[in-house]
Image (tube, rainbow, N blue to C red):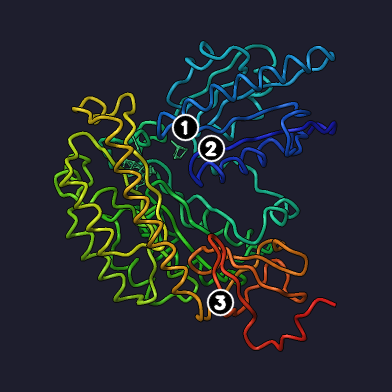
Amino acid sequence: MNSHPKKLFVRSYGCQMNVYDAQRMADALAPEGYVETQVPDDADLIVLNTCHIREKAAEKVYSELGRMRELRAERQTRGEDMMIAVAGCVAQAEGAEIMKRARGVDLVVGPQSYHRLPDLVARAKAGKVVDTEFPAEDKFAHLPAASREKTLARGPAAFLTVQEGCDKFCTFCVVPYTRGAEVSRPVSQVVAEAERLAAHGVREITLLGQNVNAFHGEGPDGKVWGLGRLLVRIAGIPGVARLRYTTSHPRDMDDELIAAHRDLKELMPYLHLPVQSGSDRILDAMNRGHTARDYLALIDRIRAAQPDLALSSDFITGFPGETDEDFRATLALVRKVGYASSFSFKYSPRPGTPAADMDQIPEAVRSERLLELQALLEDQRQAFNRSCVGREMDVLFDRAGRNQGQVAGRSPYLQPVQVDSSTLGIGDVARVRIVSNGTNSLFGERVGVPADMETVA
Ligand code: SAH
Ligand code: SF4
Ligand code: F3S
């Protein structure tokens, strides 16, 4: 234990798993005396928690490292210093290459080694260190838990990684290489973490995994538990008002999980279920393992279990070999499903993935299709938001509102909701009637509370 406080700055890119990892890195370094700072300028240790999913994301790291090196040079003129570490998926994918390309990096650490950070940081003081092993030990068993204060400061909605890695090998994707094979945490470990979060005031937990619904953790009964069963168990923890899980693969939506959508009031009626493309030919070339019709039939089944379900998806435009007809099939699928929100990307060839060696289609075509798809998805998002006006829904309040006297929260469908209230606090879940919608937020008023009780004095 070192009592002299040192400052840690972590910047995360990429998916929610990196957000979770950033917290765990801070937790791992807290016993060494590191406290988090929101600005890099005065940090003793800077961690760039990187993403390798698309070329743009990966390249961003190098420009950021350039800036950090300037910052460091400035500090050195004042007789001070800082350490620069690269973590996350670029660290895993590029390892020692990073040291060569970006001078001034002291430590490269892959996602499976975060529990070793105190030791790695100590060693990096003496010379450059690279650790991108997939260690035999379970990092989660060795990562210290967050303090009560830290959990409270992170807010009432928390992430909890239950599964890491991926065995699906979609032909465009780096994740199986950067995060390794699919591993599920034991149920008891996940439940203990969820209980601790709830005891510290967390009301909503999002279970995370690159393939979260492939979860197959060892249960306390020695049997393998699927995600549906895990959700039932966590929903029973006192204080847990809401559950979500992301990201799911259509192939892993089993009956138990679909039943959880019917049976658990805690499980929010909002599902991110990426389809990537609506063309069977492209889905096959992507190695997704299902057809467009399979996906639509699956959605029918989940909607039958939970009629209130809203959906989101990820899409890729301009995958190698995608014809105009294939792209039209994607638009047709989007029209059939009707998404509440979506993420869409133009295909980016990634080193070492099979699709990078396929015949590429022109960049301009990828971009053009992306724009057309995004226009449709944006129309659907706006239509969904408009359809919420007049409806009542439970909102979890998680931050101060935009204006004085307002509190802000999230709807079951993750839309930001602003409410005028002097009585609602952070962490409250309250019934709200949606009265109007802006471009991104909904505006609501509390149900069953007279307006004069909510007027700020
Ligand atoms: N496990 C999740 C996705 C993880 S990556 C799943 O199976 O859906 C998040 C999203 O990034 C993907 O859904 C995909 O839409 C996008 N993506 C991944 N690799 C990409 C690439 N090479 N080019 C463009 N988009 C990509
Ligand atoms: Fe990548 Fe496919 Fe695995 Fe998702 S399922 S992480 S897209 S390989
Ligand atoms: Fe990016 Fe790694 Fe997540 S590549 S999307 S940070 S798993």
| Residue at image location 78% in from the left, 28% down from the top | 42
Above-or-below relation of 371 to 312: above
Specify few, some or many for label 2: CA neighbours under 10 Å numbering under 14, 14-19, or 20 or more: many
Q: Position of residue 128 (x, y in %)?
A: 60, 13
Q: Is mark 2 within 8 Å of ligand 3?
A: yes
Gap in Å between the C-alphas at discs 1 and 2? Answer: 8 Å
Query: At which x and y percent is residue 195?
Result: 60, 62
Mark toward the start of the polypeptide (1 vs 2)? 2
Instruction: Tell me the element at label 2.
Output: loop
Q: What residue type is disc 3 on?
A: Ile
Q: Which residue is mark 2?
A: 13
Sequence-first disc among 3 and 2? 2
9 over 310 or under it: above or below: above
User: Is the Cβ of the residue at disc 3 closer than 8 Å to that at disc 2?
Assistant: no
For mark 3, give the secondary structure: strand
Q: Name the residue that disc number 3 marks.
A: 434
**Of pointers 3 and 1, the one earlier in the residue sequence:** 1
Q: Secondary structure at mark 1?
A: helix
* Mark 1 C-beta to ligand 3 under 8 Å: yes
On the question of residue 332 being in view, the answer is: yes
Q: Which residue is mark 1?
A: 57
- Estimate the x, y position of residue 2 in percent, counting from the top left: 81, 31
Vertically, is 177 above or below 298?
A: above
- Percent of width and height locating residue 452: 77, 86
User: Looking at the rendering, in which quadrant would you find the C terminus?
Assistant: bottom right
- Taking the image in four quarters, ligand 2 sits in the one at top left
> For the residue marked with disc 1, what is the amino acid?
Ala
Query: Dot 3: within a 10 Å radius of its alpha carbon, few (fewer than 14), some, or many (20 or more) residues?
Result: many
Labelled pair 1, 2 in contact (Cβ < 8 Å): yes
